[in-house]
Image (tube, rainbow, N blue to C red):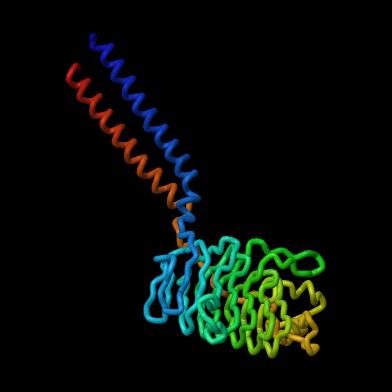
């Protein structure tokens, strides 16, 4: 083959390799974009149980150290807690409830002939984001639980212009559960807090409460220094009291059943939301995944260019 013809053929091959490399960058970038959502939400989709004997069933994303159960990653599913006197530490991770109940604190009546004797007591749930649930946290009977530093967000929360709850989702629901302490939480729900059927002596303080509370057949409940998202709608004429950051009109809501004509109120409703941490995303961001993929492909293309360039240099030097 003549020298010019061989040179022309070699140049065509080099151009073809460069075009192939460029197409790899484009295809891999597109593929990365298509796969990013799967990478960004890779989680365990299971029903999880912390059994009354202390064992964990359904996931390896919760580690146990005596009575402390710590999440080690995001979980998509539902958690049932059947053991008393434990701490569930979300450690800043997220529980996606798959439109069910995020955390249910209750015994299994099918396992016990006298269920009330095995009510679950003294459970702490903290540092956890709960989302995409019909009910964020549900407690059936028992009580003396502590919910601290949690972020409960229901994506289906709506409220019409009259202020009537839609009942599409509940933030924290207490059914016959008393003596609970809810503090430093951001709670979204419709309503955010629901208490029903012989609950009593619950303490709700210093929370951000979205869409209010609903109580029925309740005892003595304490609400103090909470931020209520619908306050300014309900009390448009309220003002600040003595530069205290507190509204001068209590936030009042009544027992919906008019049971013993009880009236519940937050006497010190806060004017501004509390600074309660909203946990940052613990999974890789879209940008970091894209940069990683593109950087790897660029290394491959650079190698191809270097090899082709070296080959051309040697070829022309040999036939100069």
Quadrant in which the N terminus appears? top left
Query: What is the number of callouts on the image?
Result: 0
Residue 211, quarter of the rendered image: bottom right
- Furthest-front residue in this view: 113
Residue 308 or 183: which is nearer the viewer?
Answer: 183
Is 280 placed above or below 250 here?
above
Q: Quadrant of the C terminus?
A: top left
Residue at far top of view? 2
Residue 139 appears left or right of 268: left
Residue 231: give x, y in percent of width and height.
Answer: 74, 75
**Looking at the image, is 25 positioned above or below residue 181?**
above
Horizontal relation, residue 295 to residue 237: left or right: left
> In the rendered image, which quarter is residue 96 located in?
bottom right
Residue 209 spot, x, y in % from top left = 66, 74
Q: Residue at x 46, y 62 (%)?
A: 282
What residue is rendered at 74% in x and 72% in y?
Answer: 230
Residue at 47 percent across and 63 percent down: it is 74
Between 274 and 74, the one nearer to me in the picture = 74
The residue that appears at 19% across and 21% down in the rendered structure is: 317
Residue 317 visible in the snapshot: yes
Relative to 90, is 23 above or below?
Answer: above
As drawn, is 307 to the left or to the right of 145? left
Camera sees residue 126: no
Residue 210, relative to residue 181: is it above or below?
A: above
Please provide percent x and percent y for residue 150.
55, 74
Q: Position of residue 306 (x, y in %)?
A: 27, 33
Q: Quadrant of residue 27?
A: top left
């Amino acid at each position: 083959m003549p020298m010019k013809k061989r040179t022309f053929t070699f140049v065509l091959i080099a151009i073809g390799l460069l075009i192939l490399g460029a197409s790899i960058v484009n295809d891999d970038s597109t593929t990365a974009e298509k796969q990013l959502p799967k990478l960004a939400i890779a989680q365990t989709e299971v029903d999880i149980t912390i059994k009354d004997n202390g064992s964990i069933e359904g996931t390896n994303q919760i580690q146990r150290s005596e009575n402390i159960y710590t999440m080690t990653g995001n979980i998509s599913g539902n958690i049932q807690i059947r053991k008393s006197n434990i701490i569930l530490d979300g450690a800043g991770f997220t529980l996606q409830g798959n439109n069910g109940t995020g955390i249910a604190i209750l015994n299994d009546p099918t396992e016990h002939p006298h269920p009330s004797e095995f009510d679950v007591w003294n459970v702490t749930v903290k540092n956890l984001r709960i989302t995409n649930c019909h009910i964020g946290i549900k407690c059936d009977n028992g009580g003396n639980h502590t919910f601290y530093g949690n972020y409960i967000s229901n994506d289906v929360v709506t409220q019409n212009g009259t202020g009537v709850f839609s009942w599409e989702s509940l933030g924290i629901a207490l059914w016959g559960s008393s003596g609970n302490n809810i503090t430093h939480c951001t709670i979204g729900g419709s309503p955010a807090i629901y208490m029903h059927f012989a609950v009593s002596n619950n303490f709700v303080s210093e929370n951000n409460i979205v869409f209010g509370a609903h109580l029925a057949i309740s005892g003595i409940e304490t609400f103090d220094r909470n931020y209520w998202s619908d306050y300014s709608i309900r009390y448009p004429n309220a003002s600040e009291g003595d530069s205290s950051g507190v509204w001068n009109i209590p936030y009042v809501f009544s027992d919906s059943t008019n049971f013993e004509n009880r009236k519940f109120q937050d006497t010190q409703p806060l004017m501004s939301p509390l600074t309660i941490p909203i946990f940052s995303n613990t999974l890789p961001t879209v940008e970091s995944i894209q940069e990683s993929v593109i950087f790897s492909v660029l290394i491959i293309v650079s190698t191809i260019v270097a090899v082709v360039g070296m080959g051309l240099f040697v070829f022309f030097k040999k036939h100069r």
